[in-house]
Amino acid sequence: MSENNEEVTLLLQLESLIGPWEGNILRRYCHLSNASALLWDYFKQINWVGFYLVEEGKERLILGPFQGKVACTDIQFSRGVCGKAARSAQSQLVEDVHLFPGHIACDVASRSELVVPILDARGDVVALIDVDSPLVGRFTKSDQTLLEQVSSLLAKMLWT
Ligand code: SME
């Protein structure tokens, strides 16, 4: 687990908010909604944070719970920062979205972005965490590490 107190608090809060999960899809959405609110409070200088869920067998992402402005509802795996994270199963830390070919501008104010995949126990991408900022270079490697810990926690708690 992370060494930083604020990061540890975030992870513990998330864990206690979710608690035991009984496999109900509605309840998964309920917990992801609270998780988006927690992340929205945690990260400073952001304009969007939320989840995209993989539509099984379709190579397509569907908008999930989020905080921020109205966003794109459907994203193909072939498109944008989210698509790249989904097809590669790798986190994408984009310093300047204007320099990312194919970036999807749901909000023209967004200038940097961090997308972290959530993998189930088989290693398949089941969802993504996406966070956007109006500042260029807002996100750091430690933000990425923290969101990867959030991703592992959510996978363990909501996809097993
Ligand atoms: N910018 C993303 C699309 C999702 S929004 O940022 C909420 C992308 O290029 O995939």
Image (cartoon, rainbow, N blue to C red):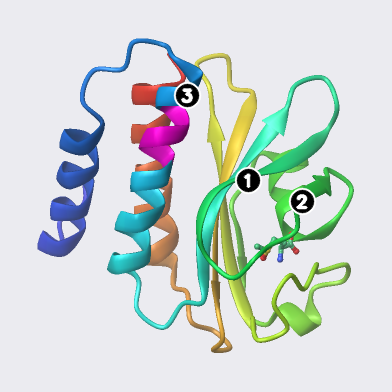
Residue 35, how many percent across, how many down? Answer: 35, 47
Which residue is drawn at the image coordinates 50% and 20% (left, top)?
A: 25
Which residue is drawn at the image coordinates 61% and 78% (left, top)?
A: 112
Mark 2 beta carbon near ligand 1 (under 8 Å): yes
Earlier sequence position, callout 2 versus callout 1 = 2
Q: Is residue 138 above or below residue 117?
A: below
Q: Is residue 69 left or right of residue 104?
A: left
Q: In this orientation, which residue lies closer to the viewer: 125 or 58? A: 58
Residue 149, how many percent across, how many down? Answer: 35, 44
The prevailing secondary structure element of the residues shown in magenta is helix
Q: Is residue 62 magenta?
A: no
- Which one is in front in this view, the residue at disc 2 or the one at disc 1? 2
Q: Which residue is mark 2?
A: 84
Earlier sequence position, callout 1 versus callout 3 = 3
Earlier sequence position, callout 2 versus callout 3 = 3
Q: Secondary structure at mark 3?
A: helix
Which residue is drawn at the image coordinates 65% and 65% (left, top)?
A: 70
Q: Which mark is residue 69?
A: none
Q: In this orientation, which residue lies closer to the viewer: 10 or 90? A: 10
Mark 3 beta carbon near ligand 1 (under 8 Å): no
In three-dimensional space, the C-alpha distance between marks 2 and 1, rounded to whole angstroms, equals 8 Å
> Is any part of residue 95 visible from this angle?
no
* Stretch in magenta: 28-32
Residue 126, how many percent across, how many down? Answer: 61, 29
Q: Which mark is residue 26?
A: 3
Q: Which residue is mark 1?
A: 90
> Are the residues flagged by discs 2 and 1 in contact, CB closer than 8 Å?
yes
Q: Is residue 5 left or right of residue 95?
A: left
Residue type beneath disc 3: Leu
